[in-house]
C-alpha cells in the first residue's frame, strides 16, 4: 500500500527536486522537473530569457512564449488549492491558463499572485464521456513580476478531486485571435483553426480521455504534433486529469491548423483540445 504525504509536504518536496538544464542556443532556461515515482502532486515550470524589445507596430512586434508551468494532483489527494511554481512574468504579457478537472463542478476559481483578472474563453467544456471539465482563461496586459504563481481553487467538498492546471505566458501579444475547442476526437479537432494575423503563436492544450490504467503503468508520454514545441505534460497523470500543451509560430494570416497529438498507448474518444491564437 502506498503511503501518502500531506499536500504541503508533497509540494515542498516537488519544488525541492530542481533540475537545472542547459537549453537550446535560442534560450536560457531554468526547468523545474516533476518528481519521480508516484507522487500525489506533480509540478513543472520553465522560464525563458526575455526577448529583445521590439517596435510597437504589428509589422515588427514579435509574439514569444516567455514562460510556462503546470501543477496536478492525484485523485484522492486532499488538495483544495493547486498552485504552480513561481515564474518571472514580463509586464504587459498575455497569459493563458487551462484547467482540467474531475468534474465540471470541481473548479471554483482561477487566480494568480499579482491579482490579475482572468476571463474565460468560451464556455465550460466537458470531455471523457462528459464526466470531466475543461476550461480556458486569458489575462491580457498583466501586471508581471519576478515570481508569479497561479492557483486552481476547488469548490467545497471537491478538495480530493483530481485536477491539473497549465499556464503559458506570452510576451509581445496584443490579444486573442481565433480559438476553438473539440471533445469529439481522440487526438484531434472537430473544426480546424484558421489564424487571423501574421506572426502569431498558436497554443494547443490537450486533455486525453485516457483509460489505460495510469496507477499501474504511469509512463504514457504524450507527443506534440509535428512541428510544434512541447511545453509540458504530466504524462498519464497518475489519475490527475493528465494533459499536455504545445505551441507553434504561424507566419501568415489565414493559415489552417489541424494538429494531431499522439500517445504511447491508445486514448479513447472524447478527449479534449483547445487551440488559441495569440496575435501581435
Image: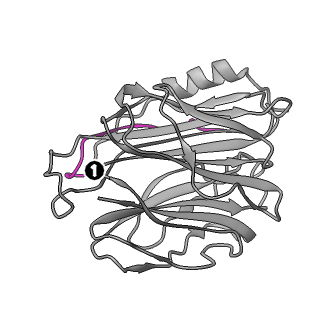
Q: For numbered disc 1, what is the local secondary structure?
A: loop
Q: Is residue 149 left or right of residue 105?
A: left
Q: Position of residue 1 (x, y in %)?
A: 85, 32
The crowd level at tag 1 (other Cα within 10 Å; few <14, some 14-19, many 20+) is many
State left or right for residue 102 relative to residue 235. right
- Considering the image in quadrants, where does the C terminus appear? bottom left
Residue 88, how many percent across, how many down? 35, 31
Do we see residue 272 in this rendering?
Answer: yes
Q: Main secondary structure of the magenta part?
A: loop
Does the magenta-highlighted stretch encompass residue 113?
A: no
Considering only vertical position in the picture, is 128 above or below 70?
A: below
Seen from the viewer's position, the closer of residues 188 and 7 is 188
Q: Which percent across, then down, holds residue 53?
A: 15, 45
In this view, the residue in front, 131 or 23, is: 131
Color scheme of the displayed model: one colour
Location of residue 20 (image quadrant)? top left
Left or right of 25? Residue 142 is right
* Residue at (82, 29) in percent of width and height: 156
Residue under label 1: 172
**Rendered location of residue 152, percent (x, y):** 64, 35
Say whether residue 29 is magenta: yes
Residue nearest the observer in this picture, 132 or 2:
132
The residue nearer to you, when weighing 175 against 185, is 175
- At horizontal 28% and vertical 46% (from top left) the residue drawn is 23
Asked if residue 26 is positioned above or below residue 10 in the image, the reply reads below
Q: Which residues are magenta?
A: 24-37
**Is residue 39 among the parts visible in the rendering?**
no
Q: Residue at x 53, y 79 (%)?
A: 192
Amino acid at each position: 500500500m502506498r503511503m501518502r504525504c500531506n499536500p504541503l509536504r508533497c509540494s515542498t518536496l516537488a519544488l525541492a527536486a530542481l533540475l537545472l538544464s542547459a537549453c537550446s542556443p535560442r534560450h536560457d532556461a531554468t526547468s523545474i522537473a516533476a518528481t519521480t515515482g508516484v507522487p500525489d502532486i506533480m509540478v513543472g515550470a520553465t522560464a525563458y530569457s526575455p526577448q529583445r524589445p521590439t517596435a510597437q507596430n504589428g509589422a515588427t512586434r514579435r509574439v514569444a512564449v516567455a514562460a510556462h508551468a503546470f501543477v496536478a494532483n492525484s485523485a484522492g489527494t486532499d488538495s483544495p488549492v493547486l498552485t504552480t511554481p513561481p515564474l518571472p512574468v514580463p509586464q504587459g504579457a498575455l497569459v493563458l491558463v487551462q484547467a482540467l478537472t474531475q468534474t465540471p463542478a470541481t473548479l471554483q476559481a482561477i487566480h494568480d499572485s499579482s491579482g490579475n483578472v482572468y476571463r474565460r474563453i468560451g464556455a465550460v467544456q466537458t470531455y471523457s464521456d462528459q464526466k470531466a471539465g475543461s476550461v480556458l482563461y486569458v489575462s491580457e496586459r498583466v501586471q508581471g513580476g519576478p515570481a508569479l504563481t497561479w492557483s486552481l481553487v476547488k469548490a467545497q467538498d471537491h478538495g480530493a478531486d483530481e485536477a491539473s492546471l497549465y499556464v503559458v505566458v506570452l510576451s509581445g501579444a496584443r490579444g486573442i485571435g481565433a480559438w476553438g475547442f473539440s471533445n469529439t476526437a481522440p487526438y484531434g479537432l472537430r473544426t480546424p483553426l484558421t489564424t487571423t494575423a501574421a506572426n502569431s503563436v498558436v497554443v494547443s492544450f490537450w486533455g486525453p480521455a485516457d483509460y489505460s490504467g495510469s496507477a499501474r503503468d504511469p509512463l504514457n508520454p504524450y507527443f506534440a504534433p509535428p512541428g510544434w514545441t512541447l511545453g509540458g505534460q504530466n504524462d498519464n497523470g497518475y489519475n490527475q486529469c493528465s494533459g499536455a500543451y504545445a505551441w507553434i509560430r504561424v507566419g501568415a494570416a489565414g493559415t489552417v491548423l489541424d494538429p494531431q497529438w499522439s500517445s504511447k498507448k491508445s486514448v479513447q474518444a472524447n478527449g479534449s483540445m483547445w487551440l488559441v491564437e495569440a496575435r501581435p
